[in-house]
Image (cartoon, rainbow, N blue to C red):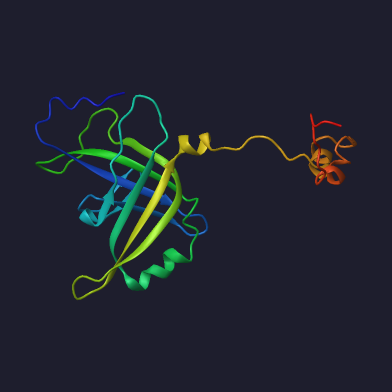
Amino acid sequence: MPLNLSSYRNIQTNLFCKLVVPGYQTLTFSDYHINYTIDSVTYQGIGELLSVSNTTSNLRATSEELSVSISGIPSGNVSDILTKKIKGSELQITRAFFNAANGALLSITGNPAGKFKGVVNNFNVADDLSGSDSSVIITVTATSVIDQLNNKVTGRRTNPIDQAEFYPGDQSFDRVPALAKSNFNFGAPK
């Protein structure tokens, strides 16, 4: 359902990111200037230190890739990122609309709204050596859930072990290992 923002003169939008890292913790952060709670989840307000790449708005769910960059991370905290399983983590991004004059969340149906849901497929760590203190920029790249479904591999292996798992007692694949490296010239002259 589209949001009706026609009665508001000045609005601001902010993005709220939730990164679920398996075996570590759930990281929540936003480009809002203060900590903010949405659905009983408190998001750390890091303001301009958060950058999210542009996305397209479509009527249907489409496959898309998105990058989230966090800058200003102290060099001592980089080991936390490098030792945890970031790839495969779930990333959710929610967009919320606020009144620009007083910073209050607009009380309209559908606010805040989901913007992106996907899985992290890569990350990059870069040093920022400008200024007296060095910091680190971490960029996480995620693909949408739709892209994950498009890349899903279907089928099963054709070997005796898997056949016995699915159909106990069936011996139809017992000769597969012996035939695996055979060369068959189908259609070749005698």
- Please, is residue 185 above or below residue 119 in the view? above
Q: Quadrant of residue 13?
A: top left
Residue drawn at x 88%, y 34% is: 172
Residue drawn at x 43%, y 43% is: 143
Residue 79 or 174: which is nearer the viewer?
A: 174
Q: Position of residue 44 (x, y in %)?
A: 29, 55
Residue drawn at x 83%, y 34% is: 167
- Please, is residue 159 above or below residue 51 in the view? above
Residue drawn at x 12%, y 25% is: 7
Q: Where is residue 147 in the image (x, y as percent from the top left)?
A: 47, 37
Q: In which quarter of the image is residue 157?
A: top right
The reply, left or right, for residue 11 in relation to residue 88 is left
- Please, is residue 10 above or below residue 130 in the view? above
The reply, left or right, for residue 174 in relation to residue 117 is right
Q: Can residue 41 be seen in this view?
A: no
Residue 12 or 141: which is nearer the viewer?
A: 141
Q: Position of residue 35 (x, y in %)?
A: 26, 53
Q: Position of residue 178 (x, y in %)?
A: 87, 45
- Please, is residue 63 above or below residue 22 in the view? above
